[in-house]
Image: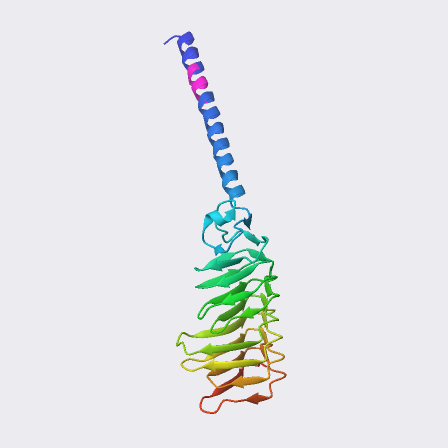
């Protein structure tokens, strides 16, 4: 093989290597663009209710853009008129701002970040759960609340405030129901609640754990039925500061504080 032939072959190899290097750079660039696209699409979005009549939360056509709000989204419900939005299956959203009415008809309705405020009426059917999770997460229902037979949980520093929940009845269902807080700074605050009627089959379990607080500051009366209270661990508290009478005759109420709970 001559020196010229070797030189020519080497030039071809270098050219192929250069082309391969360019293709690699292009491929890496395309992958980066694709990954950026995934990152952008995963960012929180604001999804707004557009149906001017009552409708179901889970129908994409009721929202703009046409998608049901998910775990990374802030849901906005603010349309003119007497509109009710019904959540008939479990929902998890970043937050919700609602100036209309909300029905939680099935499963769990959960918010996980920032403040959520409901200005209209809140109806919760038997056996459903309203949940707030995470520090600085809050859910406030400023309007009237009907929640007989429903459960509540505030976890990891979250807060649920229902100032216009006035009375509560567990009912005859044997499905277990709990009001539960778990974690320092977690609060259930029902400042307007004056009476609780316990269950006939299972108890209403009201529990504060690991530094959480259940505040029932205006609760006066425990009516007939099964009700249990538990404060477990340091700084956990169930506030029953105004309780003055229990009308329970044939069924038991239980009160327990353990591990330095209050």
Residue 16 position in % (x across, y down): 43, 19
Helix, strand or loop for the magenta stretch, by majority: helix
Q: Nearer the viewer, residue 120 or 136?
A: 120
Q: Is residue 15 magenta?
A: yes
Image position of 24 with respect to 240: above or below: above
Residue 259 visible (yes or no): no
Q: Is residue 167 magenta?
A: no
Quadrant hosting residue 83: bottom right
Single out the residue that lies furthest toward the left. Answer: 1
User: Which residue occupies 51% across, 43% down?
Assistant: 41
Residue 146 visible (yes or no): yes
Residue 134 position in % (x across, y down): 56, 62
User: Which residue occupies 45% across, 51% down?
Assistant: 59
Q: Nearer the viewer, residue 158 or 173?
A: 173
Image position of 121 with respect to 19: above or below: below
Q: Is residue 177 left or right of residue 81?
A: left
Number of numbered discs on residues:
0
Q: Which color mode does the image show?
A: rainbow
Segment tinted magenta in the rendering: 12-17
Q: Nearer the viewer, residue 140 or 101?
A: 101
Q: Quadrant of the C terminus?
A: bottom right
Q: Nearer the viewer, residue 249 or 100?
A: 100
Image position of 168 with respect to 89: above or below: below
User: Which residue occupies 44% across, 78% down?
Assistant: 171
Residue 144 position in % (x across, y down): 58, 68
Q: Quadrant of the N terminus?
A: top left
Residue 129 position in % (x across, y down): 48, 67
């Amino acid at each position: 093989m001559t020196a010229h032939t070797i030189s020519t072959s080497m030039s071809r190899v270098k050219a192929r290597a250069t082309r391969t290097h360019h293709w690699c750079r292009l491929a890496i660039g395309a992958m980066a663009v694709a990954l950026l696209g995934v990152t952008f699409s995963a960012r929180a979005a604001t999804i707004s209710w557009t149906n001017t009549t009552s409708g179901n939360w889970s129908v994409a056509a009721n929202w703009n853009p046409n998608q049901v709000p998910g775990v990374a989204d802030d849901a906005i419900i603010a349309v003119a008129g007497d509109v009710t939005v019904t959540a008939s299956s479990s929902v998890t959203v970043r937050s919700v701002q609602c100036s209309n009415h909300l029905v939680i008809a099935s499963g769990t309705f959960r918010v996980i970040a920032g403040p959520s405020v409901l200005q209209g009426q809140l109806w919760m059917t038997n056996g459903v759960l309203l949940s707030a999770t995470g520090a600085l997460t809050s859910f406030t229902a400023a309007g009237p609340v009907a929640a007989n037979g429903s459960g509540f949980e505030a976890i990891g520093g979250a807060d649920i405030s229902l100032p216009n929940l006035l009375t509560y009845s567990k009912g005859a269902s044997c499905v277990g129901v709990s009001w539960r807080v778990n974690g320092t700074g977690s609060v259930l605050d029902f400042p307007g609640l004056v009476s609780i009627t316990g269950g006939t089959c299972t108890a209403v379990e009201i529990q504060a754990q690991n530094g959480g607080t259940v505040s029932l500051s205006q609760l006066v009366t425990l009516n007939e039925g099964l009700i249990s209270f538990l404060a477990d661990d340091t700084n956990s508290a169930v506030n029953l500061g105004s309780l003055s009478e229990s009308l329970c005759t044939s069924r038991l109420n239980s009160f327990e504080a353990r591990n330095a709970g209050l």
